[in-house]
């Protein structure tokens, strides 16, 4: 969850029944949250989360030993709405291993998907030179090898 509690941290919960119930409520300080002052500050910023299971990855050679798959969390990785990045986990988000920056400028909402046929990810996100929205929505397509390089 984004920082709806105005505490500027990401809140995490786990469901093992498709979202019917939730448990293990905690905060995750690795997943940086927006806390800049002003109209966008400390209410958090939309983010995206995707998990691709090991069985759905054709070429596993770029994954570390013991990887369960790859979990990707995208948002502006800063205390302001800038630095669009992906946080990468190989154990379902229990720990985070890497941050890959897509765009260092102003950015905001994001969404990500995986195409198992082409083995590519597509990220769409808001960005701009003057503010997080002035350039509109852009898309980036990439594969796992690029993401982990």
Image (cartoon, rainbow, N blue to C red):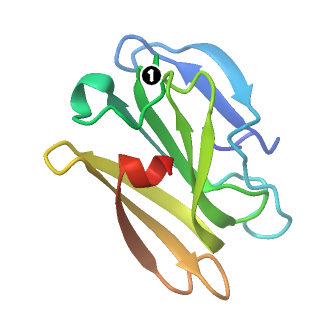
Identify the residue shown where x is 48% and y is 59%.
110
Q: Which residue is mark 1?
A: 67
Specify whether 29 is left or right of 51.
right
Identify the residue shown where x is 49% and y is 27%.
90
Identify which residue, 133 or 78, lies in the foreground: 78
The N terminus lies in quadrant:
top right
- Asked if residue 113 is positioned above or below residue 37 in the image, the reply reads above
The answer to whether residue 46 is seen in the rendering is no
The answer to whether residue 136 is seen in the rendering is yes
- Most extreme residue toward the front is 61
Q: Secondary structure at mark 1?
A: loop
Identify the residue shown where x is 68% and y is 41%.
31
- Asked if residue 112 is positioned above or below residue 106 in the image, the reply reads above
- Asked if residue 59 is positioned above or below residue 81 in the image, the reply reads above
Provide residue 62's location: percent of width, then percent of height.
Answer: 40, 38
Specify whether 51 is left or right of 22.
left
Identify which residue, 142 or 105, lies in the foreground: 142
Specify whether 2 is left or right of 49.
right
Provide residue 108's location: percent of width, then percent of height.
Answer: 58, 65
Identify which residue, 94 or 45, lies in the foreground: 94
Identify the residue shown where x is 72% and y is 49%.
33
Identify which residue, 38 or 140, lies in the foreground: 140
């Amino acid at each position: 969850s984004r920082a709806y509690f105005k505490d500027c941290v990401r809140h995490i919960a786990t469901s093992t029944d498709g979202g019917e119930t939730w448990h293990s409520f905690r905060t995750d300080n690795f997943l940086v949250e927006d806390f800049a002052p002003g109209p966008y500050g400390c209410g958090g910023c939309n983010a995206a989360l995707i998990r691709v299971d090991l069985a759905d990855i054709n070429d596993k050679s770029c994954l570390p030993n013991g990887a369960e798959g790859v979990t990707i969390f995208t948002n502006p990785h800063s205390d302001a709405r800038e630095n669009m990045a992906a946080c990468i986990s190989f154990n379902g988000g229990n720990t985070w291993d890497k941050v890959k920056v897509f765009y260092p400028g102003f950015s905001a909402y994001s969404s990500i998907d995986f195409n198992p046929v082409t083995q590519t990810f597509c990220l769409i996100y808001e960005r701009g030179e003057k503010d997080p929205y002035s350039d509109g929505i852009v898309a980036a397509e990439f594969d796992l090898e690029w993401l982990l390089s």
